[in-house]
């Protein structure tokens, strides 16, 4: 196999993430050996992993990679448990980001018990497994000395406090600022956008407003590292962390109306037909028993949960912020093994960062997942009609996702939801019919089953991708 280094790991001088085939490894540079040994011997790693707060790893023989010219007897290489599908903070719901923030602070508090501390507090250090956050950066821990300030204080505020405040106090769409600011939302920008009433919250006043002012005065924590007045006793450091916990807990999401968050309360399905659709989806999924499924446009997860009965890994994708917010909290309560993410399929997350390859696009991440089944129900008309996407382009999109199977719901021109989309625009979709739909897909897919949904102008197609 060919060694492939993760494009984002160049930022860490202490190590690099790389893959060898499907396996993921982390090379630990000599500069981090002392801290790594303390992490492992102090008991910190044991406590964090036993409580599912930090991803587990196993140490591997570095000589395995000696022939590939970058390792040897004096190197440390670990193999962490693999995260099968990576999501990014700008794809998370409010509650996901909030839980990620609280996990970061919880780990910092535990680390201090073992005379260690986090050297960075990036939201990218968190991933979600079965919708629960877990810390993935084993190299984020460093030795703590009494008097040290918490270096990543400003980073934590930019990655967590600012976006949470903006979503809570202003608008959920401001989460997208994390796409154009992958190092976190600048505090002065957040303060300019937030309404003045946001700072009636004392926590936001301290950690955003006053913090922003102190940054401008070159008196922020990150710029006073070597100044005598930067001394911070362990008691004060714990108070800072407790204050940040109180800050995060004080930020709550105000109910915001979005287009599809109550989708199933105003669909054109009668109860009998809706139950029939659930039965048909169950029957079709049971035929292929996929291990990995992705439900595109899954809304509240009704059909994701049906498919997840057969899968080891299930992912719920939707463009609606509140739909994913509600589904995330419900799935947590039900303890379902489903991971959620917010993706607009008409404008999915692109490659981002330095040289446009630090953060992978949604399409490339799905493609590399080797998914068994993509589920796409009641979605095609929103793509094809609302965004003028021809069937041939739609088929190409699904082909590029590299899934073995595709379960897609054809929504015909006589369907009331299609008629609603066409009611305020010129009907330029004369080729929008089932014959052209089938023709567009047959180049790259083989239809192995299809089921009409009652008397509706809708058909479920189970297709297999051609090699």
Image (cartoon, grey):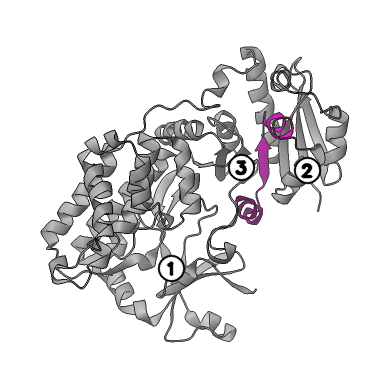
User: Mark 2 or mark 3, which is nearer the start of the sequence?
Assistant: 3
Picture quadrant where residue 217 is located:
bottom left
Instruction: Give the residue at mark 2.
Output: 393
Q: Residue at x 63, y 41 (%)?
A: 345
Residue 441 x/y as whole percent: 82, 40
Q: CA distance from mark 3 to mark 2?
A: 20 Å
Q: Which residue is mark 3?
A: 294
Instruction: Decide: is 71 above or below 235.
Output: below
Q: Residue at x 21, y 47 (%)?
A: 206
Q: CA distance from mark 2 to mark 1?
A: 44 Å
Up the image or down, 82 lies above or below 16; here it is above
| Region of the chain picked out in magenta, as a range | 362-389
Q: Can residue 92 be seen here? A: no
Which of 278 and 382 lies nearest the eye of the viewer? 382
- Marker disc for residue 310: none
Left or right: 328 as drawn, with respect to 211: right
Q: Is residue 369 magenta?
A: yes
Camera-side residue of 83 and 389: 389
Residue 374 falls within the magenta-colored stretch: yes
- Density class for disc 1 (Cα within 10 Å; few <14, some 14-19, many ≥20) is few
User: Which residue has dot 1 on it?
Assistant: 58
Q: Is 258 on the left-hand or right-hand side of 391?
A: left
Q: Residue at x 64, y 18 (%)?
A: 274
x then y, percent, for residue 125:
41, 58
| Whole-number angstrom distance, CA of label 1 to CA of label 3 | 29 Å
What SS does tag 3 mark? strand
Q: Is residue 401 above or below residue 269?
A: below
């Amino acid at each position: 196999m060919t060694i492939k280094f993760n494009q984002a790991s160049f930022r860490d001088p202490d190590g690099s993430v790389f893959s060898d085939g499907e396996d993921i490894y982390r090379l630990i540079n000599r500069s981090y050996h002392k801290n790594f040994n303390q992490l492992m011997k102090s008991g910190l790693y044991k406590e964090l992993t036993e409580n599912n707060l930090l991803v587990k790893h196993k140490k591997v023989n570095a000589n395995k990679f000696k022939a590939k010219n970058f390792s040897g007897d004096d190197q440390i290489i670990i193999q962490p448990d693999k995260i099968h599908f990576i999501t990014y903070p700008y794809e998370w719901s409010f509650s996901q980001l909030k839980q990620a923030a609280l996990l970061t602070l919880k780990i910092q508090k535990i680390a201090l018990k073992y005379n260690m501390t986090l050297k960075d507090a990036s939201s990218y250090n968190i991933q979600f497994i079965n919708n629960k956050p877990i810390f993935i950066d084993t190299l984020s821990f460093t030795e703590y000395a009494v008097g040290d300030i918490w270096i990543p204080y400003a980073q934590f505020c930019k990655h967590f406090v600012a976006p949470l405040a903006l979503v809570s106090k202003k608008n959920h769409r401001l989460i997208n600022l994390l796409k154009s600011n992958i190092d976190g939302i600048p505090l002065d920008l957040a303060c300019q956008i937030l309404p003045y009433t946001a700072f009636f919250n004392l926590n936001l006043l301290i950690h955003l407003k006053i913090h922003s002012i102190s940054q401008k005065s070159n008196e922020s924590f990150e710029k006073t590292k070597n100044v005598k007045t930067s001394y911070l006793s362990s008691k004060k450091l714990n108070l800072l962390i407790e204050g940040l916990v109180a800050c995060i807990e004080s930020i709550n999401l105000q109910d915001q109306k979005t287009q599809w968050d109550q989708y199933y309360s105003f669909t054109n399905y009668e109860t009998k037909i809706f139950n029939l659709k659930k039965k048909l989806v169950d029957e079709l999924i049971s035929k292929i028993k996929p291990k990995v499924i992705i439900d595109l446009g899954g809304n509240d997860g009704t059909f994701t949960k049906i498919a997840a009965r057969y899968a080891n890994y299930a992912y719920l994708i939707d463009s609606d912020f509140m739909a994913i917010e509600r589904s995330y909290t419900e799935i947590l309560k039900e303890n379902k093994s489903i991971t959620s993410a917010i993706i607009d399929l008409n404008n999915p997350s692109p490659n981002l960062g330095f040289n446009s390859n630090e953060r992978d696009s949604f399409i490339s991440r799905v493609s590399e997942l080797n998914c068994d089944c993509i589920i796409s129900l009641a979605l095609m008309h929103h793509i094809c009609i609302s965004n003028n996407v021809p069937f041939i382009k739609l088929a190409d999109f699904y082909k590029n996702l590299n899934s073995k199977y595709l379960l897609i719901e054809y929504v015909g021109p006589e369907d009331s939801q299609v008629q609603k989309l066409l009611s305020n625009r010129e009907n330029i979709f004369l080729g929008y019919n089932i014959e052209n739909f089938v023709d567009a897909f047959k180049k790259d897919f083989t239809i192995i089953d299809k089921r009409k949904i009652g008397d509706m102008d809708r058909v479920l197609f189970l297709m297999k991708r051609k090699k």
